[in-house]
Amino acid sequence: MRFTVTDADTAAALGSGSLPVLGTPRLLAWCEAATCAAIEPVLAEGATSVGTRVSVEHLLASAVGQEVEVTASSVYADGRLHRFTVAARHLGGNGKVVASGEVTRVVVDAERFLSRL
């Protein structure tokens, strides 16, 4: 997935810092979005997935206007449990790694899950 950092994505806007650079909460959301897209093709009708564990290192700052590519690759699947490695890189000339880590998702029946709340 590709994203462009906007003012709304910054640490200052998200309350996770005071600088006008990509905020870690937005980066985590992008990583989770990539895992949702990666798992979507294997979900049965009525099923969805929920995030249960995230471990991501935010390694490099990204300025407003910077394009970032986020990828998710399945590394483990056992029944309802799915684990993905995630990576974010700057697009354009340098391709530097912005973040890397792992996201775990569990497949659930959406209706049943919501009925338990």
Image: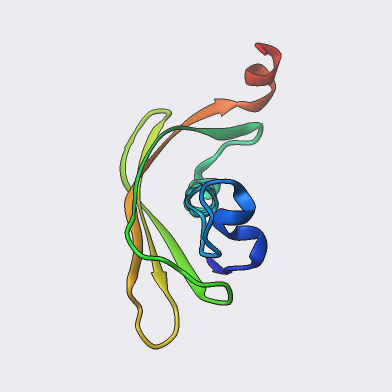
Placement of 70 over or under 84, stated as above or below: below
Extreme bottom residue here? 93
Q: Is residue 30 above or below residue 112?
A: below
**Residue located 66% across and 32% down the image:** 46
Answer left or right for 56 relative to 70.
left
> With 109 as the anchor, is 84 left or right in this view?
left
Q: Position of residue 32 (x, y in %)?
A: 50, 47
Give the number of callouts. Answer: 0
Q: Is residue 19 above or below residue 80?
A: below
Instruction: Please state the horizontal and vertical placement of residue 13, each as a whole percent of the image.
Output: 64, 54
Q: Residue furthest front?
A: 18
Q: Position of residue 37 (x, y in %)?
A: 54, 52
In the image, farthest residue toward the top: 116
The residue lying furthest to the left in this view is 75
What's the residue at 55%, 26% (across, down)? 108
Image quarter of the C terminus: top right
Residue 12 in the image: state x and y as whole percent: 59, 55
The quadrant in which residue 20 appears is: bottom right
Give the camera-side residue of 116 and 3. 3
Q: Is residue 83 above or below residue 60?
A: above
Left or right for 117, reference 15: right
